[in-house]
Structures are given as structure tokens and as C-alpha cells.
Image: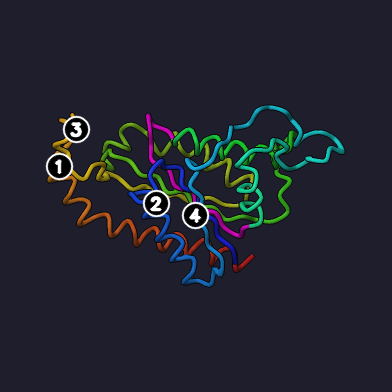
Amino acid sequence: MKILAINGSPRKTHNTAELLRHALEGAAAQGAHQGETVHLYDLNFKGCVSCFACKLKDGKSYGKCGYRDELSPVLDKAFEADALVLGSPIYFEAVTGEMRSFMERLMFSVLVYNESYGSLLEKKIHTGFIYTMNVPEKLMHELQYPQALKFGENDMARLLGSCESLFVNDTLQFDDYSKYVVTVFDENAKKKVREEQFPRDCESAFQLGARLIQKASHK
């Protein structure tokens, strides 16, 4: 069993990356013998460039992204995997631009322009999405973040096989809030959430990774 973690955060050791690490540990506990994290911000790549090489009849890139850059080998690994776990902070009510570009390149190549907008993928790749954000859970629902993010999850489920999500709220953004102009947050309250809630979020990420491999094992 292979699982690939995609980090859409510019930081390699903070909230999103830590949660992805726990997800890979959960996958390993269920028998995943290969786990790897890709940091999208390390790569020089674009989103879909509308070349349509993946849709060209009898084309050499039919069903796969024909645009070549530093994301290309990552896409190859993604389609070889049994499970994917994607992680992104939420910037302006959406995943980061790097994550969105990855999703475009991943999904468009296997999308079929037919009546059902089906998939060319011959196997299921079970997918999980971990979202990290500064806003508390109550405000997240008031602002309808889950509904907005559901569109991407539905596309992942339809084209790859399945998708489930984990929302991690009220995250600690700075080690020392006094160094920044951040009057909307209470540093002590943030640190309390980090100490009390974040370990539970890490356990949820562990269980997410485990479930993805369990699903892949029962295909």
C-alpha cells in the first residue's frame, strides 16, 4: 500500500505538516509500506494551462497531464498511490493557490467530457483532505467554509474514488504574538487550544490516514 501526502502550506514543520505526519503514521499502522510527503512550495509549477493534451484523441498524453514541469513526477506518484492525503491552510476562504493548482492538474487529466463527466481512472485512490485555519469552528460554520470547500471534495470523490475531510480550527499561527500586529486574537487562548485541542486533532489525522489505507485494502 502506498500513500502520498501533499502539503499545500508554505511551512514544512507547522500545523498542516504536523497533521500530515500523523496521517502518514496512521497509514503505516494499517500496513502502508510507502509514505512520502511532498511540499508544493518547494516546486516550480503551474496550474492547468488548457493545452488539452490530456483530451486529444489518440494523443500520447491522453488521460494524463501533458504539461511538463516540476509537478509532473508528483502527479505520477499520485496516480501510483493507493491513497492521498492533502493538507492546506485556508487563505481567504479557500485552499492555497499551490494546492488549487495541484488539484487542477491532478483531476483534469482524468476527467472525461461526456454526459456524466466521468473519470478515466481505472482504480480508486482514496483521498483525505486536512484543512487548517485560524477561525474557530463556530465562525467557520457561520462563514460556510465547509460548503464552499465541498465542491473540491465532491470532484475528488467523483474522479478519484472517495474523499473525506478533517477541519482543524483556531490554530496557533505565531510562537510570539507580541511581535506582530494581531489584535483580533488572544495569544493565551490560542496557546490553550494548541495544548488541549491540537493533540486531539493530530489523533484525528492519524485515524484519517488509517481509514484511507483500510479502504484501499478492501478494494
Residue 89 position (above or below residue 92): below
The residue under label 2 is 17
Type of amino acid at the residue the image marks with label 1: Glu
Instruction: Report if the CB atoms under discs 2 and 4 are less than 8 Å apart.
Output: yes
Nearest to N terminus: mark 1 or mark 4: 4
Question: Around disc 3, counting alpha carbons within 10 Å, would you say few (fewer than 14), some (14 to 19), or many (20 or more)?
Answer: few
**Which labelled disc corresponds to residue 37?**
4
Q: Does 147 sit above or below residue 197? A: above
Q: Is residue 30 above or below residue 137?
A: below
Badge 3 marks a residue whose secondary structure is loop
Q: Which residue is under mark 1? A: 187
Q: Tell me, yes or no, whether the two marked residues, 2 and 1, touch with CB atoms within 8 Å.
A: no
Measuring from the top left, give residue 21's x and y in whole percent.
41, 59
Measuring 74% from the left and 30% from the top, which residue is drawn there? 52
Q: Earlier in the sequence, mark 4 or mark 3?
A: 4
In the rendered image, residue 196, in percent from the top left (x then y), is placed at 20, 57
> What amino acid does circle 3 point to?
Tyr
Q: Which residue is mark 3?
A: 180
Q: Earlier in the sequence, mark 2 or mark 1?
A: 2
Q: Which residues are magenta?
A: 81-94
Residues tagged 3 and 2 counted as in contact (Cβ below 8 A): no
**What type is the residue that disc 4 sits on?**
Thr
Q: How is the image coloured?
A: rainbow
